[in-house]
Image (cartoon, rainbow, N blue to C red):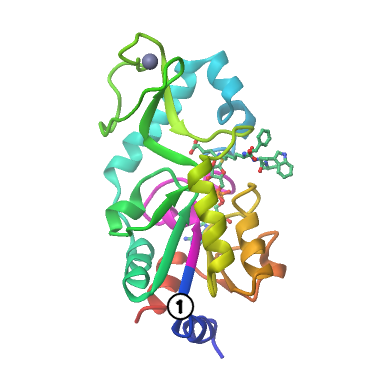
Amino acid sequence: MEPWETARHWLSAATSVTVLTGAGISAESGVPTFRGPGGLWRNQRPEDLATPAAFTRDPLRSWEWYNWRRGIIATVQPNAGHLALARIEERSAQFTLVTQNVDGLHDRAGSRNILKVHGDIWTLRCTQCARAWQDLRPALPELPPRCECGAVARPGVVWFGEGLPEDVWSEAVLAARACDVFLLVGTSAVVYPAAGLAELARSHGAKVVEINIEDTPLSAHVDLSWRARASEALPRLVE
Ligand code: BJW
Ligand code: ZN
């Protein structure tokens, strides 16, 4: 059987579907991935940008990076992969989309039950008080942005060494445990705890299907590792 036949067969028999997406699903919309050729971090170490310490050391530099990314994301569109996931959700009795992406493209594609485990680039949070708010302007005019209370604001994303939002993460764990099929799409599967959801799902009996253009550390530990672009593979599941 071809990979899409196998995956379709499992999906058609599933009551509960959980998906974990990473930067690879947005790559074809024109959003740079983190790792690999053309990746955001090709010339920089992740620890230099995506940590609380980096932000504290130089909030302006950190914000320039996020502002640049907001500008890119604002001009791109969801692709056929994002749209196919919204279609799979419509057809599934239970469906949870866990995303590591902060770009908001799943929302724009019409997905409903989305768990953003690494936060959202369009949310700002105060570094001093408890305020958090949305700011959808593609690029912020003044950097670093400030809260009403006067303190510097930070992006509402999760950096290395920070815990994931607890309620969101608990729901993701439940969805991984409960599903019959788990799709692992466009993620290098090196960042934990998110990558661990695939192993959790499998240990609870789900069929795990990986869709990626390259091998990952999890490729050898899934039921089906499908070498394909997300924008081509996912639409085949709803044809
Ligand atoms: C395509 C495609 C196409 C391309 N179609 N595919 C040692 C062991 C285990 C864990 C740890 C450890 N030491 C530390 C940790 C924990 C740490 C971690 O995982 N580190 C490892 C890297 C070593 N994790 C954390 O710190 C997390 N928190 C935590 O654990 O809390 C508890 C704790 C508390 C206190 C101390 C320690 C722990 C938090 C992780 C936060 C991650 N944040 C980032 C930045 C978000 C903000 C921002 O956007 O700037 O999240 S890092 C970055 O990586 C981002 C992503 O969501 C995440 C995952 O990346 P992703 O999405 O997989 O992208 P890529 O670029 O890596 O891969 C793209 C893939 O797509 C590739 O495979 C391509 O082949 C593929 N692709 N085109 C299909 N068209
Ligand atoms: Zn404040």
Taking the image as shown, residue 185 lies to the left or right of residue 102, namely right
Residue stretch rendered in magenta on the structure: 18-38
- Quadrant of the image occupied by residue 2: bottom right
Identify which residue is drawn at 30% across, 48% down: 76
User: Magenta span: helix, strand or loop, mainly?
Assistant: loop
Seen from the viewer's position, the closer of residues 111 and 141 is 111
Residue farthest top in this picture: 150
Taking the image as shown, residue 228 lies to the left or right of residue 72, namely right
Residue farthest bottom in this picture: 1
Identify which residue is drawn at 40% across, 66% down: 231
Q: Position of residue 25 (x, y in %)?
A: 45, 57
Residue that label 1 marks: 15
Specify few, some or many for label 1: CA neighbours under 10 Å numbering under 14, 14-19, or 20 or more: some
The kind of secondary structure element at disc 1 is loop
**Where 43 sits versus 205, above or below?**
above
Identify which residue is drawn at 31% across, 56% down: 78
Whether residue 22 is in magenta: the answer is yes
**What's the residue type where badge 1 is placed?**
Thr
Identify which residue is drawn at 54% across, 59% down: 174
Taking the image as shown, residue 127 lies to the left or right of residue 210, namely left
